[in-house]
Amino acid sequence: MALIQDLESIVTTVLPTDPSFRSIGRELLDLHIAKARNHAVANAKDDFLLSLMRLLSLPGNGHTRLIPNGAISVLPLRFATIGTTVRLLSAPPDHATAIGGELISINGIPTGEIETRAASLLAGTPSRKRVIGPILFVWPGALRVLGVWSGGDAIDYTIRSTAGRISTLHLDPANQIPGAMLYPRSEHGKADASWSPTNFLTIRDFGKTGCLLVLPSFFDPGETALANAISTAKDLVNSRPGLPLILDLRGNTGGDFLRTMPLIDALSEGAQDRRVALLVDKFTFSAAIVFVAILKHRLGKRLVLIGEEMGDGLTFFAEGGTLDLPASGAAVRYSSAFHDWAGGQIDATTPPEIAARLVPVGSLTLDRHWAAPSDDAETLERFCRVILEDLAR
């Protein structure tokens, strides 16, 4: 099957459907479509996929993007941006001692410079770009287009350990594995790329001090596990109406916020002096951001927002669907509905059930900056004890 068919699917299905493209001029669209068509005709798969990434990033809407993970091969290193640094989360045994270290450069080009060169290929806010960007560091085709690697020779990664030691990893570009093995479609920032939530609620009871509720996802294809988790959380909240609470939404890439409304209602209808902290990070997306927005609107100053900027802003296009591209093996995430949780505005594309709950939050300013891997249970426990003490004051 020819790559040109994938492009035609995007041109005929995604571009007319996705309202985020309404702000993009026809001339600019045609320019990038022509570039993608040239690469498709030449059967230059990597160049074709990268040109599609550029095309789909034009609206700056993070929900609208090419997902190349299942279509490409990468070097066997898993990177993710933790806090403000790109860290090595997994590697083959001969490079295992470098795991946990910070990526300083590739072939002598600083990580920040590579991120700048790659920015136009990545959709969405700077936070989202830091989430989805690290796959480009191990995709030889992308490194070539970004001017980091000229082809043929080994690719050198300079890593600084947590102790400050510098080492260089020499990777043979011929030694590649499927991209989806190390980079999931919904990037969560955990060391295990195959991680998925085994349950939708974990409770850590600190007694009279308060409780931690970990909510790792709002996406439940089975439609019962999330509902049961939300019901359990709601019952806990109702049974201890004045207890300080921490809700951990780090790594929660979204799902259906409507199914979380019973918990939002319980949190907002409880004791008027209850304080709630929300932990968020750049891997917090979509419905999880909406959860935060509604709760902030209802609780006001009683809600404390802790962590780092979430993966999207408050005004975006979402819903839509995913289009699989059979020739290349990539996928396209496209949008169909307008969300404005900053100003509370709607348009003709906003579904009625969402419009009925839209509230004008204005902004979600962090009360406290904090970044730690979401799978670091020991650090989380220590931090929660500090936060619960603060909430009780």
Image (cartoon, grey):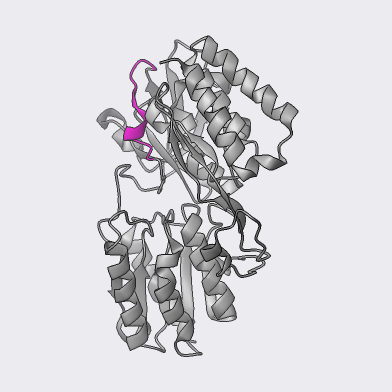
The front one of 239 and 278 is: 239
Does residue 142 appear in the picture of this structure? no
**Residue 149 seen in the figure:** yes
- Which residues fall within the magenta stretch? 173-184
- Quadrant the N terminus occupies: top left
| In front of the other: 130 or 2 | 2
49 in relation to 185, above or below: above
113 or 160: nearer the eye?
113
Residue 237 is covered by the magenta coloring:
no
Q: Position of residue 357 (x, y in %)?
A: 55, 70
Coordinates of residue 207 in the picture (x, y in percent): 30, 84
Query: Relative to residue 71, is residue 225 depicted above or below?
Result: below
**Is residue 174 inside the magenta stretch?**
yes
> Residue shown at 36%/48% (left/top)?
190
Q: Position of residue 340 (x, y in %)?
A: 63, 60
Locate residue 115 relative to residue 82 in the image: left or right. Answer: right
